[in-house]
Amino acid sequence: MKKPRTPFAQLALIAILKVIGRIIYRLSVYHRDRIPAKGGALLVANHVSYMDFLLMVTAIPRPIYFVMNADVFRKPVLGPILKFLGCVPVEARNGKNDLNAFNQSVVKLIAEGRLVALFAEGTVSRTGQLLEFKKGVEHLSGLIDGPVIPMHFDNVIGTPFTYRAGQGKMIRLRLNTLRRKVRIEIGLPSAGPVTAFSVRQRVKEMEALNFSRRFIDGESLQSRLARVLRKQPRGRWEGHLSDISFRSIPHRISQLNQILNRPLHRHRRVAVLLPKSPEGLLIHLWLLMNHKCVVPINPEWSNEQRLYVMNQSGTGILLTTTDLHFTRCAPVADEVIYMEDMDAAMAERKEVSVVCRNLNSAGRELRSWFSRTPERDDTAALFFHIQNDQWEQTGLTGNHLLAAVHSLRQVHYFDPELRMYLDLAPFTSHGYVIELLIPVICDLSLSLTGEGTSSEVFAHGLLRNEYHVVIATPDQLRAISSLSESRNIPFLRHIFCAGINPGDAAIEVLNSRGITVYCCAGSDQTTSVFAINISNYSGKDIVGKPIEQEGFEPGSIGKPLPGIAVRITDPNDDKRVLERDQAGTVWVSGMAVAGKASEIINGWWKTPWKGWINHRGFLFIAGERQKGIPALD
């Protein structure tokens, strides 16, 4: 096939656009060789910016003809550029005749050996999620004589002409929005007809891959926390008896450096057994920022279980409290540092004393002098739990934790004025992400409940403090539902709940009272939640036309978060991936997914759940109740 000729004026415009693209973005393009050197092809990409065409022009060496909404061509500046590039307008107002003419135009261009690009979502995403792929890609794949090549643009949100979830205002061209690193993944070509669902699933998997690259190459968790705390945040952790302002954290971290650096400098892993409190969270934050691996201890464990965890984790030092009512029995560690001694040491500005130093700790220290340099361990937190009478452990790196935070932030706008209320277990990955990291990074005020708070007490706590956002367990959700039948709760905006049947009667009661309940799903293996319902978007597009974008689907546990891919396979054949609305085994992949090496197969975690994905990308769990999906407690 001869290489099609492109007018010189069009080539000149493409060259100018490439220069502009390199000025606005820092691009990394993966698998550029998958674009054929000659011959026609249909490129299908996600759509997060009105400048996506510029990204594609900059990344692809060949001229591209874009398929776009005809209304965009009517914009004063953008329209003439698109027409000059030879773009194909989609005008559906006149029905089938216009669509047939559009199909013929695309088929002709590809037959001539051109590259045609299609943004299958049909509009720029305002939810932070990948939207439903329209049927146009299906129809064209059966008509064209060329491959379909999926593409994914990562880290574009925040650049000019994009939207953040929950904010209707478009980001404008400013100095602080330029030079963001954008990663473009080009997928394997597919010959022959494809379904819109299968292409969307492939783009979603490419999103997870790009998301992983973002954190492998990017800022560390410690650097991110330090940068956030330098900005004089206004949020705080509010406890029953005390609270800590985030603005005071740098000073408190400095105080902890003075008393803890020396006694802990030999210890890479530190066990923590503390009651839930702002001071306890501060200790966890200090350990993370000082590159320690935190081993949270469940207060409900027996002394034998604690000893097992400390031996398995390889740590001989424990940070705890002298309150034996809380610790229940004598601490089991070679060395112990008490919270009360830390408070006294900070008041006296001296090094904290270590108690229970015994022959085991002396032997451990002596062996460390003669042992080889240990292999690098990037684990930031090591969680233990008992499942089916067997001990399970999950090691999370700083990248795992940071990816979980970014996934949630991309789909939900955390307004700093909002106050959150929850009762999570600090010895789980859920507690780490949502109690420890989300408030600090997003600058929120978070209220902590006391240990052992009943669901009824938790529900009545809403009335005293008028919280805006609640993360609840199923039992807590039902208690709030019962309370709402006798009391008005106008201040409560959203409730997020995992581990509950989306058709539960309590959800219907709360929804009828104007309180939206968003069902989601999470697991220790996925750091926090991996699928979540969010608000639908209702607004206007770039030319002022009303648009609706889906974020919520009744009966589902939501869409997989950005950076998380989910696939469904045949229960009898793990290698056979199912199409939409077909029930099977749920697999999860992404940077926020961790677990034992034996549980991860080619980067995918095989969950114990059965479910299916609909055409919009929402995940449904089979069965009356989502067995195996733990609540965020």
Image (cartoon, helix red, strand yellow):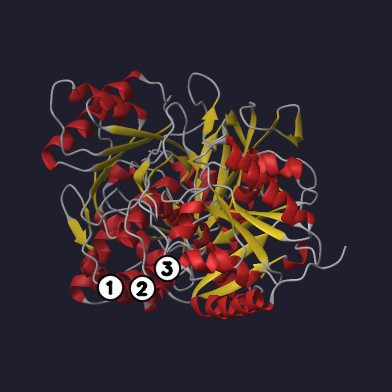
Label 1 residue SS: loop
Measure the alpha-carbon separation of dots 2 and 1: 7 Å
Which percent across, then down, holds residue 160? 42, 68
Residue that mark 1 sits on:
231
Q: Quadrant of the C terminus?
A: top left
- Crowdedness of circle 1 by 10 Å Cα count: few (<14), some, many (20+)? few
Q: Is residue 80 visible?
A: yes
Q: Which mark is residue 338?
A: none
Amino acid carrying mark 2 in the image? Arg
Residue that mark 3 sits on:
160
Which percent across, then down, holds residue 269? 49, 62
Comparing labels 2 and 3, the label whose residue is closer to the camera: 3
Residue at position x 25%, y 23% from top? Answer: 512
Q: Viewer-proximal residue, 325 or 104?
A: 104
Amino acid carrying mark 3 in the image? Pro
The mark that comes first in sequence, 2 or 3, is: 3
Q: Which mark is residue 227?
A: 2
